[in-house]
Image (cartoon, rainbow, N blue to C red):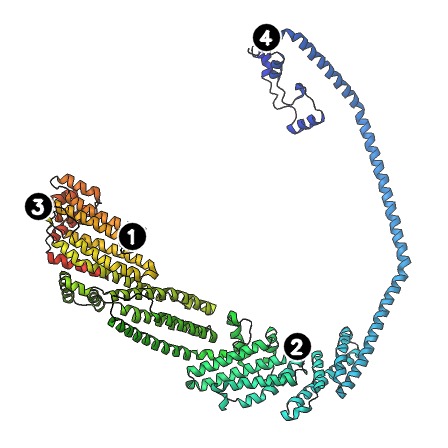
Amino acid sequence: MVPIATNMNEIKPFESRDTSQGLYSAEVQGLLQSVFPSDDPLQQPNFNVVDYINKLFPTEQSLSNIDDVVTGVENDIRDLDEEIRLAVHSQTHAVTEGREALEDAQDAIQQLFVMIKSIRDRAEQSEQSVKEITRDIKQLDTAKKNLTSSITTLNHLHMLIGGVETLNTLSQKRCYSQVANLLQGVKNVMEHLEKFKHIPVVKELSGKLYEVESCLKKQIFDDFDNAFSKKSTARQNIDMELLKDACHIADSLGGSVRKEIIKKFIKSQLAEYIVLFESTQDCAWLDKIDQRYSWIKRALSEFEERYSRVFPQTWEVCEYIAVEFCSITFKELVNIMQRREKEIDVRLLLFAIQRTSNFETLLGKRLSGATFKNTMSEDIASTPEDIDQSNPFYEDVKKEAQQKPKNNADSNNPFIGLISNCFESYLHIYIKSQDQNLAELITKFQQDFQLSQSNKNTESGAGIQSEVLPTCADLFVYYKKCLVQCSQLSTGEPMVSLARLFQKYLQEYALKLLSNNLPKLSVSQSSNASVTSGLSFSSVTNLIKETTSQLKDSGSSESNKLTSHDISLTCSILSTADYCLETTQQLHEKLRQKVDKNLENKINLMPECETFSSVVANSIQLLVFDLIGSCEPAFYAMSKVSWATMQQVGDQSSYVSAIAGHIKQTVPQIRDNLSSVRKYFTQFCLKFANSFIPRYVSALHKCKPLSTVGTEQLLLDTHSLKTLLLEMPSVGSHVGRKAPASFTKIVVKGMTKVEMILKVSMYPHHNEEAFVDNYLSLFSASEADIFQKVLEMKGLKRSEQTVLLDLFWRKQPVHSGDSTHGNMQNSAKKSDSHMSDSALKIKKLEKLIRKKL
């Protein structure tokens, strides 16, 4: 039933009232609802009059209660009016009460302010009273502090006066043990009086202390000079305890005194060495270098026995002697080798380097290397009138050692290179010697190879088992020895020179031991010669005629075939090249690890890797070319069969059997010889398939004219060859192994195309339209040359070929320039049809030779 409100005209004014906005904002209404919660719909902010009336009178029958509803509403209105009246009446006194409350609050705040001011005044009075009370106490504290400081200063002054006088007396008596204990204390006291230096007394005492220190320095230097500047025979009376105490005093006097003492002592200790091994002496040359190291060993042993207890252990005097010895030796060796460079040979150089390296290693084991962790050595080197003033170790050698990264094995030994770096500029002698040794080694390898091959040729038997040539292992063993030796000598530019030397003889090995010893086929040998030497046109023509005659004569073809020994040799060279390829890659990485980081980019053996890869490819191509050449008589016999007169289809043809015989004879031997490098046998099969199928198609084009029976026979032969090729990887093997998928794909795709050519040839040509459409359904429109060959194989007349060719070209997709291109192709095909059989043979042989090269 329709609500009554929609049918009553008197209700319509209520419908137009907009109550959705309300009297207050949503936020105020929400607060009111939270303060005065109510369920009365009249008090809701979203009150709707129409909905409210419809709720009261949902039906027409409910209108009978309208009087009661009106009465209830009127009662509610009266109640609200009463509440409003009471609320208004109650608010009449609110203004007066609020004003009174505000005045009370202001009075309270004023009273609080008065109380706070009173408290602050009393606090200030209390603070002033405390200050009055503690004023005398602060004065007493300040007086106490000043008195304590004065007493301390006076004590320090008294101690300084007594200490300076005592030091002066003890220093004159050389009582170093007592001076050593007292000096540091006096210096500490002087530090406390540093701020009083402007006072005359303190200034005078400071001057006296400086004079005492100067006197002590002079006395200590004199004592050390007297002790170690005399002859060794007079050194038995040295007062070791006196010098020991003098060293303690030197520690208190400062580092400069300690350095000067060490410098003078080292100079006295090495004075004899400088005289004995002066560059004009016989023992100064490299062949007597052991005597230098024996001398310093004795000197260090003598120092440990006699003088080690004189110097504090922290001074590291023994190590400084060794470092200075290395510095002097470096300088002397550089000078003498510059003058006598022509007398240096590789044996003498390696002897000197070996003995020097052993000595440096010994120093690293016996000494701690602490002198390299501080700047003392640099300070000594910069001291005037010192034997180290022109020493290259502290300026050049040490700088090079810091810039040059050491090997991991020597990173913990700072003595490595202190002397041996002087030999680095002469390592070209070592490199030159290795160059000569490697040249002799390659020559020896050639002689051994020729001798071994001559012995094998005289041996009876079918063939030999392929293996890696032992010479390549010998070469890389020698390389390893050179690499280890050179890395011990230097990891800088000499290592780069050695890498270039390795590259040179890897190339020579690849050429002289591998490429040059590959068996030569007469055809391939002649073709290679024609390419490399640039033969004239007449020479190439003679080559083609000679090759053609060889292919016609099966006997001569057999003479060109590789023997079982040649096949094994080829596989052996292939395996050797593969071994050299892998080992060269490892050598490349090893060299880059050994050489200095900044020289890594100069090491590159990738060209040599490519050279060995080329030898592998040439070996595989030689085997493929040999097997293809073995099949040439069969292809020639195939072209001589009268396919047009064949009456019936029989078993596979004799040429197929001949090809199968060659494959079954050759492939097992190649597979067995390449058993250690199986991947290259797979490559051989792939390359053979890629070469055999086009050659078979070429021979097939020469089989013309073809009858239907002849075509069926060729289809049978093609299927037999397809099966033979698919079984080729495992032919003659007792282990059934599935052929590689890539090989199977090539064979199936290639031989299927041959079968399609034969099937097109079988299709009748009387319906030209159907014949062309049948061809285009099997071959792409771009393979026009195959269409021309099919027409020739069918033995069609020239007029018939012309009609079919015109129809073929008309069915080609039309593009800009295609018409001219098609006419040119048609003209070319017609001109090709006039070529003689001999010209076709010559052209095919040229393609075969180019494919080989």
Q: Residue at x 56, y 88 (%)?
A: 273
Q: Are marks 2 and 4 in contact (CB under 8 Å)?
A: no
Quick one: SS at disc 2? Answer: helix
What residue is disc 3 on? 799
Q: Earlier in the sequence, mark 4 or mark 3?
A: 4
The percent position of residue 404, horizontal first and vertical second, equals 50, 72
Residue at 46% of width from left, 67% of height from top?
593
Spatial CA distance of label 1 from label 2 is 77 Å
Q: Front-most of 719 and 109?
A: 719
- Residue 450 got which mark? none
Circle 1 residue: 743
Secondary structure at badge 3 equals helix
Q: Which residue is nearer to you in this view: 841 or 118?
A: 841
Q: Nearer the viewer, mark 2 or mark 4?
A: 2
In terms of image quadrants, where is residue 564?
Answer: bottom left
Q: Earlier in the sequence, mark 4 or mark 1?
A: 4
Query: Between marks 4 and 1, how big is the CA–CA gap?
Result: 97 Å
Q: CA distance from mark 2 to mark 3?
A: 113 Å
Q: Amino acid at mark 4?
A: Glu
**Badge 3 vs badge 1, beta-carbon distance below 8 Å:** no
**Residue, disc 2:** 314
- Choose between 262 and 715: the one closer to the eye: 715
Does residue 241 appear to the left or right of 328 in the view shown? right
Q: Earlier in the sequence, mark 1 or mark 2?
A: 2
Residue 814: tell me if it is visible: no
Instruction: Give the labeled residue for mark 4.
Output: 60
- For mark 1, give the secondary structure: helix
